[in-house]
Image (cartoon, grey):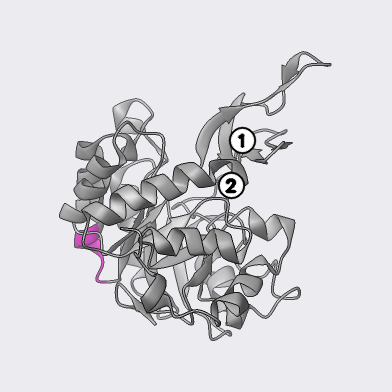
């Protein structure tokens, strides 16, 4: 199948930040069966990430505050991308920066790499120029960064939206008007957990991103709203652990899905969904509830 100019093996991908750079799962599953791999967010320079503890389990999901820990662009290209180039699986690189220019430089450099079939722009990271406010919190901020990256690359550009906004449709429309070829949503919801015995927060930075089954109803609602409003493909993300979970997203308009926290529950989650989808005609299901 094709999505926004990217040839996918099937409509089930693994979400950024939950599958490393492919190497971590290559001995566990046949990664060539995946629709595509979305790599962990990379920044221009290496990032150590936030201090531990930075992950904790909640009753229905995971709370994390990793802080975009990654090896930086050079190591990514020299090591991680080189490793992935051996496999017949589309590679979509998730990029993140604290400024428009950092994202532009990432896009330019990755556009020269034949293994990279598309970019997923993470606009949930803080914009230093705006005092740490996320790019994706306002239509204006979204439009500015998407427009800048759009000019820097001819690769298909997917923009990953944050759910931590007042009106997701406004943000989605701003991304599309600025040149996004597709949208992926949702990223994590802001949350907090407390260890009542120790009387302290469970993660060092107090606030983290909640993922997993708890956020699925929110994600399904937002995918429905966005798919109803825009003309570009929408990729559904949020608590997908089973075939039925994925079908929910397709029925409300998603053209593809990404499995995130489910990879930690069972490394074969995405493959199980891919196998289950073979019994369905996606053209018949997609958007049937719009």
| Along the viewing direction, whichever of 288 and 29 lies nearer the viewer | 288
Q: Depth check: 83 or 196 in front?
A: 196
Depth order, front residue of 196/281: 281
Q: Is residue 153 magenta?
A: yes
In the image, which disc is placed on residue 283?
none
Residue 31 in picture, x, y percent from top left: 63, 78
Measure how far apart labels 2 and 1 are at the Cα level.
Answer: 8 Å
Which x, y percent locates residue 112?
Answer: 35, 75
Crowding at mark 1 (Cα within 10 Å: few <14, some 14-19, many 20+): some
- Looking at the image, which residue is at 57% across and 54% down? 17
Q: Could you tell me how many numbered marks the image carries?
A: 2
Snapshot quadrant of residue 104? bottom left
The answer to whether mark 2 and mark 1 are in CB contact below 8 A is yes
Disc marking residue 69? 2
**Magenta segment boundaries in residue numbering:** 150-154
Residue ID for mark 1: 50
Residue 143 sits in quarter: top left
Q: Residue furthest top?
A: 199
């Amino acid at each position: 199948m094709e999505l926004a100019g990217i040839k996918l093996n099937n409509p089930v991908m693994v979400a950024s930040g939950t599958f490393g750079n492919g190497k971590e799962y290559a001995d566990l599953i046949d990664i060539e069966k995946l629709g595509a791999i979305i790599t962990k967010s990379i920044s221009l320079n290496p990032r150590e990430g936030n201090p531990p503890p930075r992950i904790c389990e909640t009753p229905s999901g995971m709370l994390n505050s990793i802080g975009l820990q990654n090896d930086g662009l050079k190591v990514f290209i020299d090591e991680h991308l080189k490793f992935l180039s051996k496999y017949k699986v589309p590679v979509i690189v998730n990029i993140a920066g604290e400024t428009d220019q950092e994202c532009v430089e990432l896009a330019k450099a990755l556009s020269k790499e034949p293994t990279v079939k598309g970019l997923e722009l993470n606009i949930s990271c803080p914009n230093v120029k705006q005092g740490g406010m996320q790019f994706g919190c306002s239509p204006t901020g979204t439009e500015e960064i998407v427009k800048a990256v759009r000019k820097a690359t001819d690769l298909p550009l997917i923009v990953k939206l944050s759910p931590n906004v007042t009106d997701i449709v406004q943000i989605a429309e701003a991304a599309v008007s600025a040149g996004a070829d597709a949208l992926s949503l949702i990223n994590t919801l802001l949350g907090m957990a407390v260890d009542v015995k120790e009387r302290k927060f469970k993660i060092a930075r107090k606030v983290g991103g909640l993922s997993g089954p708890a956020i699925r109803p929110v994600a399904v609602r937002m995918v429905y709203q966005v798919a109803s409003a825009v003309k570009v493909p929408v990729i559904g993300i949020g608590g997908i652990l089973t075939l039925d979970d994925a079908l929910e997203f397709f029925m409300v308009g998603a053209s593809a899905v990404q499995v995130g926290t489910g990879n930690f529950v069972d490394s074969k989650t995405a493959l199980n969904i891919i196998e289950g989808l073979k019994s369905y005609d996606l053209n018949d299901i997609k958007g049937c509830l719009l």
